Amino acid sequence: MKTHSTKSQLTGFFSSVGITAVMLCLFTMVFFLIYAGRSQRGVRHLAEFNACSDSLTSLSHSMSLYARRETESYYLSACESLSFLEKSLEELLKDTAEPLICRELLDLSEMAAHLDAASLAMHGAVDSYLASGKADYAPVQNRLDEFQTIAQVMFIRCDDIRNLYLESSGSGYRQMRRQTWMFLLVFISGSLLILAVAIRHILKIVSDITRPAAVLTEKASLIREGKLSDSRALPVPPTSNEEFRILSQVFDDMTGQLQKQFETMAENARMRRELDEIKFKELQMQINPHFLFNTLNMISEKAYFECADETAELLRCAARMFRYSLDFSGKAVPLGQEIEELGNYVFIQEQRFGRRIRFQFDLDESIHNVTLPALTLQPLVENAIVHGVGMMTDERAIRISTSRKEEKGESFACIVVEDNGAGLSPDALKRIRDMMENYQGESVRIGLGNVAMRLRYFFKGKASISLNSREGEGTRVALLLPLAKEDRDAV
Amino acid sequence: MKRTAALSFLLFAVLSLLLALLVFEPAGSFDKTALRFLCLMPPETEYYWGAVRSGIAEADASFGTYTRIEDYDRYDISSRLRLLSQTDYFHVDGIITIGEPSSPELGAAIASCIDKGIPVALIDTDMPGTDRSFYIGTDNQKAGEAAADKLLELTGGTVHAAVIITGISDANQSERLKGFRRVIDQDPDSDVLVVYENRSDKAALATFLTRTLKSRPSLNAIFCADASTSTTTGVFMKDADISRQLFIIGFDEVAPTPQLVADGVLSGVMIQQGKQMGYEAVRLLIDYKNDPALEPQELYTPAILVEQKDAEAYIS
């Protein structure tokens, strides 16, 4: 959806309404100016024509007086009126568009020309009459009659033209009234249309603001109640208001971050709780360990004095093993030290199983500086003995190897403990894998789960442990521990 | 902003168009060289004369001529003579008027106009023996014959008719009567029982009809030879209680005659083609003006018999 800022929406709205209003005003002005012009033209024509009619009356009157009194000034006055009449008719003819009126005006102009000729003849007759010493008036009277006949016809035609003008004005007026109503209809329709569009526009602007505002308020309420997921799930309705679109996006992002932080805090709290439980369990397990250690040392010395060297060595290894367990439990040790301490356990087991179990070491000492939780490898070797090769009567082997491994651009220390013992059935393998994955320290008997959990916490999820096995063929446990920068560089 | 500009432009265009439509005034143009005719005829009180005027107006619009129509009292010849004499003072290219056979003064005035080079057209009524340029009007004898033929058809071949006319001196009605008689007289079983000259007296006509219907039991047909007698007879018959089968043919399309035909009171009405007369008069005047050597001539327009099935179209 295309979005606009509130400012641009309001600017668009007010400019549209403003421009429309200006145009309607212009439209109205132009309409009325045109109509005013037309009305004035009609009135002017009628006034001019009335003036023509008046001049015809004056002309007829002057000529009658001239015939009776033979005074030149009356004749000149008549000529002046006639000249005015002819000019006015000519002007009207030029300015009139109505064909029927034009036809009448043309007839009238022609009659005015006849009138002009008749007036000249009249003047001649009067001159002759005066020259003859007023002997015979009859020619003057005849000319006057002819003049008045034409004037009379012109009067009648003038009436006709006046009627035509009035009729034309009437029809013009009716047409104007019709057009004015049409104009009003258009104006009102246009105004209503604009009003409707304006209301729709303003409602949209308001809706674009109020609807997301209401939803954001509801979201804020949910956050206050701690329902962050519900708040995020509540959709903000699509809006063309840019500010609210950004605001709702930011709001959702902030809620997401807050939710993530809350989750992290909860996870940390859970991990602390689990560590506390582990520590407690460890303490529970360390009941009188020093008493045991001292006792073993004492027995070892006794065996040595009795020349039972082998037993003395076994006890010494066991004592060292206990000490390591006691001193470094829950601490981080270098891989080298872990493998060295593992040697005590291996020695004891070699003495126990003799040739039945052969321990093989394949070590890359360049990575032995990597630190890991103490007693990580011992449970793995113990598992290999107990569940793998311990039950076998023929000769078996347990192989412990360390190597460097590159994976996805990262360097890892790879520690593998593998045996060729009994192996695991697919069901057992799956069950153990599940336990490794979901182990939360509830049972210390699960050595692999314990190792996996400790590595997870120690390496913050960056280490991994994998278990592979085939029934009757053996089991392989591999640890991948991330190398610190200095370990990576040490070759 | 682009949208606003586009909308503004659209609005401007729409308003301009509306303004143009509202204030548009077709510009009239007057051609000073166009032919100017003068028509003298009775006022437009009858439909027939209105039709003639509309024909003239249509011809003016078609041929670009200007015909000035002057009203006159049909029975006042002097007013017409005065109007004709005015043609001395303004330009006239042709005259249309109605003939008056009984007026030699009108004949002289027409001759004077012809002498001045102004062609004169007579419509509706001719003036045989005058110098008029041409006559155009209904063939009244044929109209009378058509009415008689229709009555023969309606009565099954035996017509005992009454003919009602306004005045026997009216040349047109006289012609119609002549045509009617000619057809009836040819049929040995038919006859014209009576010719009644009404002289526009409605009361007298009602009396005549009442008396004739009583005294002449064989009467089965009436022919009204003009508009006035047709409407009066039709209105009378509508209200009269007549037991016998009576067929009436009227004349001219004057209200309420078409309605009476539609109602079945009148069997039919002869309608003259006034509009065609007016149109043709102007058209022929142009020919005569352009070619003064054209010989005088008579042109006849048909009178159409309108019966009940077609009457609706003539009811205005």
Image (spheres, coloured by chain):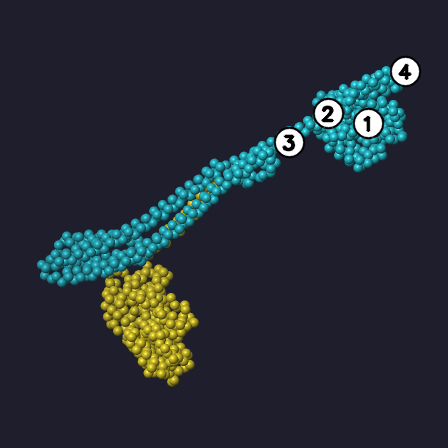
Chain colours: A cyan, B yellow
- Structural crowding at the residue carrying mark 4, measured as other residues with C-alpha within 10 Å and reported as few (<14), some (14–19) or many (≥20): few
Residues marked 1 and 3, same chain: yes
* Residue displayed at 61% across by 32% down: A259
Q: Relative to B247, say whether A248 is above or below.
A: above
**Marks 2 and 3, how far apart at CA:** 26 Å
Q: Could you tell which of marks 4 and 3 lies nearer the N-terminus?
A: 3
**Marks 1 and 2, how far apart at CA:** 23 Å
Residue A436 position, x and y percent, is: 75, 32
Q: Nearer the viewer, mark 4 or mark 3?
A: 4
Find disc 4 in the rendering and name its residue. Answer: A306
Q: Quadrant of residue B127?
A: bottom left
Q: Could you tell which of marks 4 and 1 lies nearer the N-terminus?
A: 4
Residue B56 position, x and y percent, is: 34, 64
Mark 4 and mark 3 residues within 8 Å of each other at the beta carbon: no
**Marks 1 and 3, how far apart at CA:** 37 Å
**Marks 4 and 3, how far apart at CA:** 63 Å
- Structural crowding at the residue carrying mark 1, measured as other residues with C-alpha within 10 Å and reported as few (<14), some (14–19) or many (≥20): some
Residues marked 1 and 2, same chain: yes
Q: Is residue A426 left or right of residue A133?
A: right
Q: Nearer the viewer, mark 1 or mark 2?
A: 2
Q: Nearer the viewer, mark 4 or mark 1?
A: 4
* Residue A482 visible somewhere in the drawing: no
Find disc 3 in the rendering and name its residue. Answer: A263
Residue type for callout 3: Glu
* Residue displayed at 39% across by 75% down: B267
Find disc 1 in the rendering and name its residue. Answer: A382
Q: Could you tell which of marks 4 and 2 lies nearer the N-terminus?
A: 2
Residue A227 position, x and y percent, is: 60, 35
